[in-house]
């Protein structure tokens, strides 16, 4: 996170508001989606408690959709490639207006009867009530939106950096790295990294079996 920024973490249960500054991020408020005057309350927190700083929105809800896609490399200009990506995204996720594509380092070289291609991950989320309420709250706060991101994608670089710190010199580097983080509600966010890039992510609910264990 860049210094002096507000971060909104969108989860299935609540919206978490963080203030990021030179000393790092701190949790300012968590607000349930069912709270009365949700949009106005969030807007007040952003504008007053967080000083109206630019807002970074991080989505970490269960419903996120990912696809790996090939995109032709040769003979395609920059503007044509953007149009091609938009068309492919529309075909891949016709019912999800919030969608984007990002390139991976993996490439497919030219072979007989096959053109060279780049590999992209296509991602999309539904335009849910939570999404609409979050955007409306930021607009009411009059703060600018710096970016809207999917947390698993952003975590990929962090996991790569953490592994680099833990890896001991002289040992072979692992091709696969798995990161598991736990939400306040108990859900486990799993992010699987292959060769430093996102390969798989999912959210797994944790079921409390204490009653069964003591029965």
Image: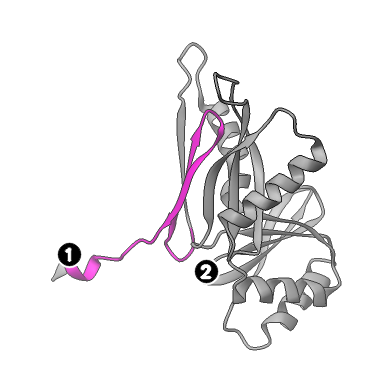
Image position of 38 with respect to 28: above or below: below
Question: How crowded is the residue under tag 2: few (<14 C-alpha within 10 Å), some, or many (20+)?
Answer: some
Q: Percent x, y for residue 198?
A: 54, 39
Residue numbers of the magenta segment: 183-212
The image quadrant where one finds the C terminus is: bottom left
Going by the image, does 146 lie left or right of 63?
Answer: right
**Nearer the viewer's eye, disc 1 or disc 2?**
2
Q: Nearer the viewer, residue 30 or 172?
A: 172
- Residue 45 image-quadrant placement: bottom right
Q: Percent x, y for residue 17?
A: 68, 66
Which numbered disc flags the more N-terminal residue, 1 or 2?
A: 2
Image position of 41 with respect to 26: above or below: below
The residue singled out by tag 1 in the image is: 213
Q: Is 70 covered by the magenta stretch?
A: no
Q: Which residue sits at x=51%, y=23%?
A: 167
The residue singled out by tag 2 in the image is: 12
Going by the image, does 214 lie left or right of 159?
Answer: left
Label ID, residue 65: none
Q: Is 184 covered by the magenta stretch?
A: yes
Q: Which residue sits at x=56%, y=49%?
A: 152
Q: Secondary structure at mark 1?
A: helix
**Discs 1, 2 touching: Cβ within 8 Å:** no
Q: Percent x, y for residue 197?
A: 56, 35
Q: Which residue sits at x=65%, y=64%?
A: 97
Q: Which residue sits at x=76%, y=45%?
A: 82
Image position of 99 with respect to 28: above or below: above
Inspect this view and state whether residue 143 appears.
Answer: yes
């Amino acid at each position: 996170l860049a210094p002096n920024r507000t971060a909104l973490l969108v989860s299935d249960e609540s919206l978490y508001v963080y203030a990021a500054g030179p000393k790092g991020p701190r949790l300012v408020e968590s607000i349930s989606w069912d709270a009365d005057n949700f949009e106005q309350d969030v807007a007040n927190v952003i504008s007053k408690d967080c000083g109206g700083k630019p807002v970074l929105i991080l989505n970490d809800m269960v419903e996120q959709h990912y696809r790996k896609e090939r995109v032709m490399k040769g003979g395609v200009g920059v503007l044509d490639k953007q149009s091609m990506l938009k068309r492919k995204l529309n075909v891949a996720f016709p019912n999800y207006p919030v969608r984007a594509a990002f390139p991976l380092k993996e490439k497919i070289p030219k072979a007989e009867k096959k053109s060279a291609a780049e590999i992209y991950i296509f991602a999309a989320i539904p335009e849910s009530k939570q999404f609409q309420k979050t955007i409306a709250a930021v607009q009411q706060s009059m703060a600018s939106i710096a970016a809207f991101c999917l947390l698993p994608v952003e975590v990929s670089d962090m996991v790569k950096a953490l592994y680099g710190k833990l890896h001991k010199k002289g040992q072979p580097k692992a091709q696969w790295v798995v990161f598991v983080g736990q939400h306040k509600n108990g859900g486990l966010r799993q992010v699987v990294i292959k060769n430093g890039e996102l390969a798989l992510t999912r959210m797994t609910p944790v079921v409390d079996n204490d009653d069964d264990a003591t029965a």
